[in-house]
Image: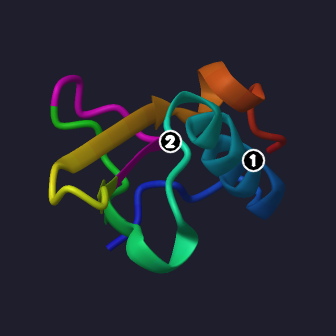
Amino acid sequence: MTHMTGATVKQFKDALEVMRTVYPYKDEDTRIVSDVSLYSCEHYSLEIATRDETGIRVNLSCDIKAVCGETQE
């Protein structure tokens, strides 16, 4: 189930790169957790999770509209 309908692939990829500036996750160790904000139930939200080399889990989430701009209809 996706709630990012209307978001572009570029916005999705750009959001992932912005998140990488906050925490330098590795693609092969990171999973998409959700595409709906659990806090606001807003669409265009992306959440990913990874584990660092010490075993600590890191969750990152962002509002794609805020990070990448509005979608084109």
Q: Amino acid at mark 1?
A: Gln
The single residue placed furthest to the front in the displayed view is: 54
Say which of marks 2 and 1 sits in front.
Answer: 1
User: In the image, is residue 55 part of the stretch drawn in magenta?
Assistant: no
x and y percentages locating residue 48 in the rendered image: 37, 54
Q: Is residue 1 above or below residue 41?
A: below
How far apart in space, not on screen, are marks 2 and 1 (Cα)? 10 Å
Q: In front here: 73 or 16?
A: 16
Asked if labels 1 and 2 touch by Cβ distance under 8 angstroms, the answer is: yes
Q: Residue at horizontal 62%, vertical 19%?
A: 66
Q: In front here: 25 or 35?
A: 25
Q: In front here: 2 or 50?
A: 50
Give the crowd class for mark 1: few <14, some 14-19, many >=20 residues within 10 Å: some
| Quarter of the image with the C terminus in it | top right
Q: In the image, which residues are magenta?
A: 39-48
Pick whichever of labels 2 and 1 is earlier in the sequence.
1
Q: In front here: 26 or 68?
A: 26
Q: Residue at horizontal 41%, vertical 56%?
A: 3
Instruction: Specify whether 70 is left or right of 49.
Output: right
x and y percentages locating residue 60 in the rendered image: 36, 39
Residue 50 quadrant: bottom left
Q: Amino acid at mark 2?
A: Tyr
Q: Residue at horizontal 24%, vertical 33%?
A: 41
In the picture, the disc for residue 11 is: 1
Q: Residue at horizontal 40%, vertical 68%?
A: 30
Q: At numbered mark 1, what does the secondary structure look like: helix, strand or loop?
A: helix
Residue 9 quadrant: bottom right
In the picture, the disc for residue 44 is: 2
Instruction: Specify whether 50 is left or right of 14.
Output: left
x and y percentages locating residue 5 in the rendered image: 56, 59
Instruction: Specify whether 41 is left or right of 69.
Output: left
x and y percentages locating residue 22 in the rendered image: 54, 29
